[in-house]
Amino acid sequence: MLIRDGATLVRNADDAIAVLESMPKMVVEEAQIHLQLETPSKPARSLSSFNALHQSILDRLGPSPVAEDQLLRDIGTETREMVPVLTDMELNGKIRRSTGGLISRA
């Protein structure tokens, strides 16, 4: 249906490059500006704040699983700050994820 409406079929990177090259330069520049405006600036976390969040998570976890969203509410931090820390802790074997969005200390 999209092809019928004028969309271009893109099967590989060469197809995508050809489409971008055929676009008027003004449209490409406008798209780049739009992307730059929507990209939020991510402040660099200091090592001490990273460690404090790490320890705060470990302090609230025990052997029994806790819902991840409940942990977020208890700690009071934003999801975008918490998820990378939880992923790091999971990869390092500090926490364990269970089905249903539950997290426990490993």
Image (cartoon, rainbow, N blue to C red):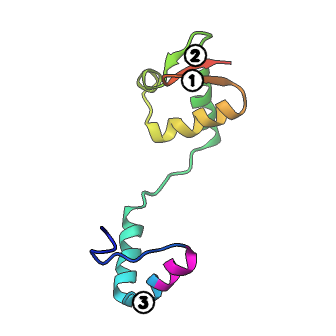
Q: Is residue 39 magenta?
A: no
- Looking at the rendered structure, the kind of residue marked 1 is Ile
Task: Tell me if label 1 and label 2 are in contact, CB under 8 Å.
Answer: yes
* Few, some or many residues within 10 Å of mark 2 (<14, 14–19, 20+): some
What's the mark number on residue 61? 2
Image position of 53 (left or right of 33): right
In the rendered view, would you say 79 is above or below 95?
A: below
Q: Report helix, strand or loop for mark 1.
A: helix
Number of numbered discs on residues: 3
Under circle 2, the secondary element is loop
**63 over 49 or under it: above or below:** above
Q: Mark 2 is on which residue type?
A: Leu
Image quarter where the N terminus lies is bottom left
Give the x, y percent position of residue 23: 39, 87
Residue 36: percent from left, percent from top: 42, 68
Per the image, the residue denoted by label 3 is 22
Q: What separation in Å lies between label 1 and label 2 (alpha carbons)?
A: 6 Å
Viewer-closest of 20 and 79: 20
Which dot, 3 or 1, sits closer to the camera?
A: 3
Q: Classify mark 1: residues with Cα within 10 Å, few (<14), some (14-19) or many (20+).
A: many
Task: Write down the region rendered in magenta.
Answer: 12-18
Depth check, front residue: 68 or 98: 98
Q: Is residue 49 visible?
A: no
Q: Position of residue 49 (x, y in %)?
A: 58, 36
Q: Which residue is mark 1?
A: 57
Q: Residue at x 41, y 24 (%)?
A: 73
Residue 69: percent from left, percent from top = 43, 25
Question: Which of the marked residues, 3 or 1, is nearer the chain's N terminus?
Answer: 3
Which SS does the magenta portion mostly show? Answer: helix
Tell me the quadrant of the picture where the C terminus can be found. Answer: top right
Q: Of residues 96 and 62, which is closer to you in this image?
A: 96
Q: From the viewer's perspective, is residue 25 above or below residue 83? A: below
